[in-house]
Image (cartoon, rainbow, N blue to C red):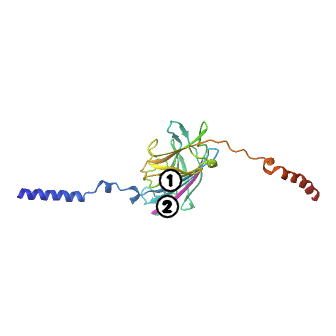
Amino acid sequence: MVGAVVRNVAALLVALLALAAPSAASDFPPLASGPGERILAFDADITVAGTGDLHVIETIRVRVKGERIKRGIIRALSLAATTQDGALLTRRYQILSVTRDGHDEPYVIEVTAESMQLRIGSAESLLAQGDATYQITYRAPDQVRADGSMRELYWNVTGNGWVFGIDAATATIHLPDGARASTLKLFTGAPGSTAGDGRIVQREAGTIEAKARLPLTAGNGLTILIRWPAEPAPQRATRNETVGPLVLVGYVILLPLAVIIL
């Protein structure tokens, strides 16, 4: 009888301890629900010119707690990339503007062997705790690769140099001259990852939207691969083709009259 009671009490204690112990889900809550510093949203608007240049506007909304983000953020822009087929691409950038909450923000550029780092913020002032929105506008020349009759853009949207997670990563890409893409791929994870946990769709001719399905942990990023046919640019019409013979006759008649009046 006593042994049975002891066993029942022991079983009850084990059950209570199991209820009190944190579960795996509570140990590792979804990134989006965490209270710490992170990137709440990373959105890139990328316009591809017919020359192969990119015009990029990155809008980065961060949660500031005074931990790692004290005076600003560091955006590391990679100087090279390797495509899925092993081609090595070089990157160059021209910074056009940097703002925080709609106002110009100071920044300095430091170049390492692997990246061009934008150190954004003032060394003399601390950020207030809360949310802040940074916008980085830059130009990246000659980033479209020619492959026979096709054109290809392989682009790391977010970069992989962040020391904290990204809750939501999105991108909108505008192809030149309303081109329609024939290949759309999305990759998430560490550099070179072939995992594609997200969605990339063509909304209309020339406009493509990409989105990571889940939050990205530190060191992981969002990369896109887009291919489209290279069509020759339509030739600009000459004056004779545009105005037609009747209007040309008008010019022949009116021009002497204008000379006489003057």
The residue range painted magenta reads: 129-139
Left-right relation of 92 to 198: right
Q: Amino acid at mark 1?
A: Thr
Which label's residue is closer to the chain start, 1 or 2?
A: 2
Instruction: Report how far apart the C-alphas of labels 1 and 2 lie in the structure.
Output: 18 Å
Depth order, front residue of 81/122: 81
Residue 170 numbered tag: 1
Circle 2 sits on which residue? Answer: 132
Among the 4 quarters of the image, the one containing residue 37: bottom left
Q: Is residue 14 above or below residue 234?
A: below
**Quadrant of the image containing the C terminus:** bottom right
Front residue (pair 262, 213): 213
Q: What residue appears at the point 84 percent right and 49 percent down from the top-left corner?
A: 245
- Image coordinates of residue 129 in percent, x first then y, are 45, 63
Please provide percent x and percent y for residue 239: 80, 48
Q: Quadrant of residue 259?
A: bottom right
Q: Residue at x 28, y 55 (%)?
A: 23
Is residue 125 visible in the rendered image? The answer is no
Which is closer to the viewer, label 1 or label 2?
1
Vertical position of residue 145 compared to residue 22: above or below: above
Amino acid under disc 2: Ala
**Category of crowding for the residue at label 1, using alpha-carbon neighbours closer than 10 angstroms: few (below 14), some (14–19), many (at least 20):** many
Left/right of residue 243 with respect to residue 37 in the rendered view: right
From this viewpoint, which residue is outermost toward the left?
1
Q: Main secondary structure of the magenta part?
A: strand
Residue 88: percent from left, percent from top? 53, 37
**Mark drawn on residue 244:** none
Note whether residue 17 is visible: yes
Please provide percent x and percent y for residue 52.
62, 44
The 10 Å Cα crowd at callout 2, few under 14, some 14 to 19, many 20 or more, is: some
Q: Nearer the viewer, residue 198 or 167?
A: 198
